Image (cartoon, helix red, strand yellow):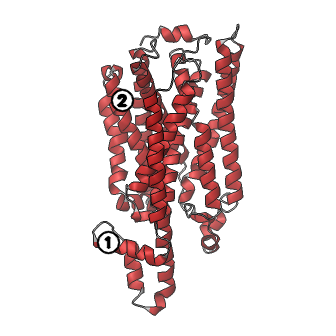
Amino acid sequence: MYKVSKNIKILSFTLMIIGALGIAYGFYSAPKTIEQAKELVADSHGHGHSNDSDSHSYEEADHSDSKEGHSASHDEHLLHKLQNRPWSSIYVAALFFMFLSLGTLAFYAIQRASQAGWSPLLFRVMEGITAYLLPGTLIILVILILSAMHLNHLFVWMDPEVVAHDKIIQGKSGYLNSPFLIARAVFYIFGWNFYRYISRKYSLAQDTSSDISNHKRNFQWSAGFLAFFIVTESMMSWDWIMSVDPHWFSTLFGWYVFASMFVSGITTIALITIYLKSKGYLEKVNHNHIHDLGKFMFGVSVFWTYLWFSQFMLIWYANIPEEVTYFITRIEDYNLPFFGMIALNFIFPLLLLMNSDYKRVNWFIVMTGIIILIGHYIDVFNMIMPATVGDKWFIGIPELSSVAFFAGLFIYVVFNSISKAPLEPSGDPLLKESEKFVY
């Protein structure tokens, strides 16, 4: 039985406290008026930190009375972007850590539904990671509700004044409206968490069962959940991520987001498994199990790259203005994180994990895993920030504080859940196969 160490508790609470203070500072330092926004942009521009197209637009507008309305609109837009930064930082971090849990849940369901014989020794680690799904998704729901209450400007289609002058958003208003968005979010969150609850229940019940009825029920629920998941995950990606750019759409986007969360979840399983084994737990987990996790990390990283390139190449080559503007914005204003993400999410995993022997070396998996997680955080950053913050982005106190807060919360919830049940699913009928697994 695993017991949460004092160091884990200290680390998690320290991260949450530091993160909360940094988040509070981010909101405190955000401009409250257009004049403060102008001063902030002028200061950053004067110090060479901003490529500020908005400052140029309002400076030029001041030279002509006929452009006062245009200037006022740009000034307000500038204020909203600067005010969005702390909100966007929280939203990016909340999405990323929720993705770790949701991606793990999908991987867990696949193992259950496929009756995989190698993975039962890792089930309790997966169940621990998925414990974060409930608080993680509820935090997202709260952010969506606050957005619908117009406490931020993350979703421009929620602004009635914008919709009144935008025919494209008006055409999507049957789907993109706040009540329907919240209703869909509640539906997704309930379905994902209900499966997690029922699967965990049957998993624990199987430990003391005299037959395999609970195992069979888990198999049936997992198969059904996967059908539910593949639909709701795609819709979630449209609702929570793609709609921050309401003029843009991609038919590959749901798969792209899935690949990102899937490899991140698998990487998290590998890192926590290696940590627990280093502390004397999970004794029956051997280098063959780590090797298989490394194979999934490698394979899904390549799959993610395939989807990224397919989405990018088709849109860029077609050069349709409504579609290509998505990438132009990111290439011009987010050049380093946009292309740096490719190196972190594809080149490093490819080079480090291509050799089969390296997948059996724990420190190699840990090093690669950290790179992958950083890369996919930047991936989520690239999905949200260009639409909500524009060229006013920077990785500073709000961003780092948000990551620290949610990392602390994630670590506490996951390890606390892992400590609630035996690390070995003793009643699983495939446990012996998992113990003897050799690749």
The relative height of residue 374 versus residue 194 in the rendered view (above or below) is below
Q: Amino acid at mark 1?
A: His
Name the residue nearer the viewer: 28 or 77.
28
Report whether 317 appears left or right of 96: left
Location of the C terminus (image quadrant): top left
**Mark 2 residue type:** Val
Outermost residue on the bottom side: it is 65
Q: Which residue does the numbered mark 1 point to in the structure image?
A: 45
Classed neighbour count for the residue bearing mark 1: other residues with Cα under 10 Å, few (<14), some (14–19), many (≥20): some
Above/below status of 186 relative to 214: below
Element class at badge 2: helix
Quadrant position of residue 131: top right
Q: Residue at x 41, y 62 (%)?
A: 329
Q: Is residue 49 visible?
A: yes
Residue nearest the viewer, comparing 25 with 196 = 25
**In percent of the image, x 41 and y 39: which residue is there?**
373
- Which numbered disc, 1 or 2, marks the residue that appears first in the sequence? 1
In this view, the residue in front, 69 or 366, is: 366
Q: Give the number of the disc on residue 366.
A: 2
Image coords of residue 224 (percent x, y): 68, 29
Numbered badge on residue 406: none
Residue under the point 55% across and 22% down: 124
Mark yes or no: residue 258 visible: no
Classify mark 1: helix, strand or loop: helix
The image shows residue 177 at horizontal and vertical percentages of: 68, 60
Residue 404 image-quadrant placement:
top left
